[in-house]
Amino acid sequence: MAKKVALLQGNTACALGAVYAGCTFFGGYPITPSTEVAEVMSEELPKVGGKFIQMEDEIAAMASVIGASLTGAKTLTATSGPGVSLKQELIGYACIAETPCVIINVMRGGPSTGMPTGPGQSDVMQARWGTHGDHAAIAVAPASCQEIFSETVRAFNLAEKYRMPVQVLYDEIVGHMRERIEFPEPGELEVIDRAAPTCSPEDYKPYDAKSDTDVPPLAAFGSEYRFHVTGLNKAADGFPTTKASLVDFEERRQIAKVECPEARADIESNEEYLCDDADVIILAYGSTSRSARYAVNELRAEGIKAGLFRPITLWPFPEKRVAELGKQVKAIVLPEMNLGQMIFEVERIVKNDCKLAGVHRVDGEPINPGQIIDQVKEVI
Amino acid sequence: MAYDYEKSIRPGKLPHIWCPGCGHGIVMKGLIRAMDTCGLEKNNTAIVSGIGCASRLPGYMDFCTLHTAHGRAAAFATGVKMAKPEMNVIVCGGDGDGTAIGGNHFIHACRRNIDMTYVLLNNHIYGMTGGQFSPCTPTGAKASTTPYGNPDPIFDISKLAIGAGATFVARTTAFHATQIDKLIAEGIKHKGMSVIEVVDDCPTTYGRRNKFRSVVDMMKVLKDTAVPVAAASKMTAEQLEGKILTGVLYQEDKPEYCAQYKQVIARAQG
Amino acid sequence: MSAKAEIEIIERYCKGCAICAEFCPTKVLEMDAFVVKVANADACIACNQCELRCPDFAIKVHKL
Ligand SMILES: Cc1ncc(C[n+]2csc(CCOP(=O)(O)OP(=O)(O)O)c2C)c(N)n1
Ligand code: SF4
Ligand code: SF4
Ligand code: SF4
Ligand SMILES: [Mg+2]
């Protein structure tokens, strides 16, 4: 049977991906260029018995998705720029309380209101470090409408599996671009549901980790399990503690559960295009990677051995592979629609193993292949 | 037999952290009795709070409890209630939590008329952080950030709730202990957003600075300034100066939010 | 006069705020340093006010 296909905007693909993943709750607040995600969710969720609520601001939207998630629902919110800034305190809450949820950030420029209708990629570091305190982060960055669909599904899977907020970052260009997408059949993409506790309700402790990288199961409010949730540092039983050893264990575990080698192997996802024999790598993510791929083809046609390395998972960052590539190539060129964010992460990893040069643009225009090609020629 | 509070409290959690004479404990006892009267099941009832001394209340209660971030309780609770409307949802928190940082969430929960019961413990001060003035600190009063007296006018929380659309609004004080559970129970039974403001005391950060010799003095003031609504209707404006009206201040039947959304689902599926 | 209730004081919960003693209509209770004690047991009329107003779950009125 032929697959269902449609010509869809990225934001629509995102919403439909969420529904595919089993999302039943959306709490949001409109902001360009993410609004269409909310609009489509308001139409689609009630059809499947799910709930859509437009809250009074982004903080409330974030609060509502955490509250709803604690009842067992898969939950989504979507926003951009200033809205992401407003959500930060509660993103931290979701981290420490280990509550799954997915946050869509359709990136625009900034700071502040900036250029609401222009694309940007300036939230890469915000996605990693936006909320205060030590914490892990998972963020993915799809580059096409089809990939927005599948990465949104994967974001839900990661949120449920690792019991934490997961951010999906794409820019205005991909968010508003229309592309043909093929709908996966039910069951075609993996959908991970929340692990239920197996112990008796009396024995249940919401943070009862079996190891220092463990993700303990989260019960649902309204089930036979009854528990306490707080944003304070807490012990295995969920109640506040200031005991140094317990606080230390929990803080480290909540990071290690994402950054241990097994988890990294599971979470990380990259695309490599002509990297094996490359002398120069263009490291690009999101819509910028589309210009980068074009540049690679042009450069190859001119006899320059260029390759594209595209992190799909931005956080945790693919440190190991980037370090290997740094040793292999003469130079890495990193185009991004900001004045330097991911480039510092790459610099930290490749050190002096190869040359590193950025292509940066914050004028609301996308980075074009010509700019990338020029920079590649300049460094090699 | 004396009333058994322990059956609603998590084992080993008492004594609580509140200071000697802090009214929050009296309110918690009233809440326990009210929830008991209404037969709320532990597994099917969420108690949601923000941050502050008052917001530590849920941690003691043997229910599904959610201690959130400063000011955000009503928004978290809205998520819980929307996602699982069959759950009973109680929100509790302080005057600062509910009317300053969380004022917007508070009024919008009222506006939606979502079926939950908000117990607002109004001690006129930011207790937890050491006594800075809140939107409910009386004009002229001393707080750690109003050393020359508070220049700000106050919010009348109950009027705010009524104006914002809550459909059951009541007020009492920590002195009037039996009225606390009576009003909260009525609020729980009411379908829609109910707000029960309990005027209570913070002897540690408010009483001390404002020349109350003891918590007993503060309780006496609560006793003397409370006027039941029925009695108030026979009093002059002059006589009512500085008084707090107690009892059910407002009640109305209006469509409840989750019920309204059920119709949205029916239309989408129809 | 005989007591209408037996007053139980849970000393480890009592924080000595004196609310119970102050508002007891028949002055059954008295403060003893930082805890309350029953000083006049026979006068208790079992009105329950001390229990209702104790913020600390430290006093129980067992009606006789
Ligand atoms: C975002 C944020 N801002 C400020 C604080 C500091 N803070 C904690 S509790 C509190 C005030 C609490 O006052 P209230 O809600 O009236 O409760 P009370 O302690 O008086 O019971 C403040 C300002 C915080 N925890 N979070
Ligand atoms: S500081 Fe005030 S509000 Fe906080 S526990 Fe002490 S008396 Fe109660
Ligand atoms: S029950 Fe009434 S009379 Fe007896 S001690 Fe308590 S307050 Fe006093
Ligand atoms: S009211 Fe309670 S805490 Fe206060 S003195 Fe009496 S028994 Fe002790
Ligand atoms: Mg207060």
Image (cartoon, rainbow, N blue to C red):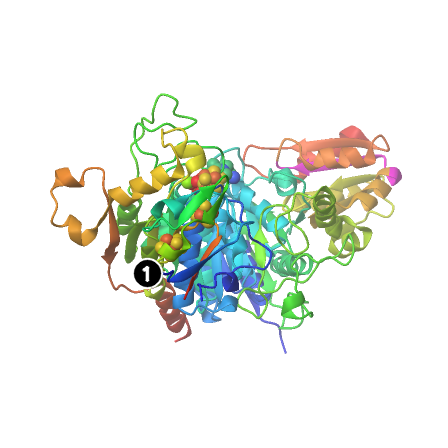
Query: Residue at coordinates 67% horizontally, 56% vertically from top-left?
Result: A207
- Label 1 CB less than 8 angstroms from ligand 3: no
Residue at the spot 28% in from the left edge and 58% down from the top edge: B167
Most foreground residue, A292 or B267: B267
Residue located farthest toward the front when viewing the structure as drawn = C1
| Residue B65 falls within the magenta-colored stretch | no
| Boundaries of the magenta span | A327-337
The chain carrying label 1 is B
Seen at 41% across and 48% down, the residue is C29
Spot occupied by residue A35 in the image (x, y as percentages of width and height): 46, 51
Q: Position of residue B269 (x, y in %)?
A: 42, 74
Residue B93 horizontal side relative to residue A357, left or right: left
Q: Is A6 left, or right, of B217 in this rendering?
A: right
Q: Amino acid at mark 1?
A: Lys
Eyeballing the image, is A295 above or below A1?
above
Q: Which residue is mark 1?
A: B182
Can residue A58 be seen here? The reply is no
| Picture quarter with ligand 5 | top left
**Horizontal arrangement in the rendering, residue A230 relative to residue A244 (left or right):** left
The location of residue A177, given as percent across then percent down, is: 54, 51
Q: Position of residue B159 (x, y in %)?
A: 26, 47
Q: How many marks?
A: 1
* Disc 1 residue crowd, few under 14, some 14–19, many 20+, Cα 10 Å: some
Compared to residue B267, the image places residue B180 above or below, namely: above
Image quadrant in which the C terminus of chain B is located: bottom left
Q: Nearer the viewer, residue A14 or B185?
A: B185
In the image, residue A332 lies in the stretch drawn in magenta:
yes
User: Can you say whether A130 is above or below B150 in the image?
Assistant: below
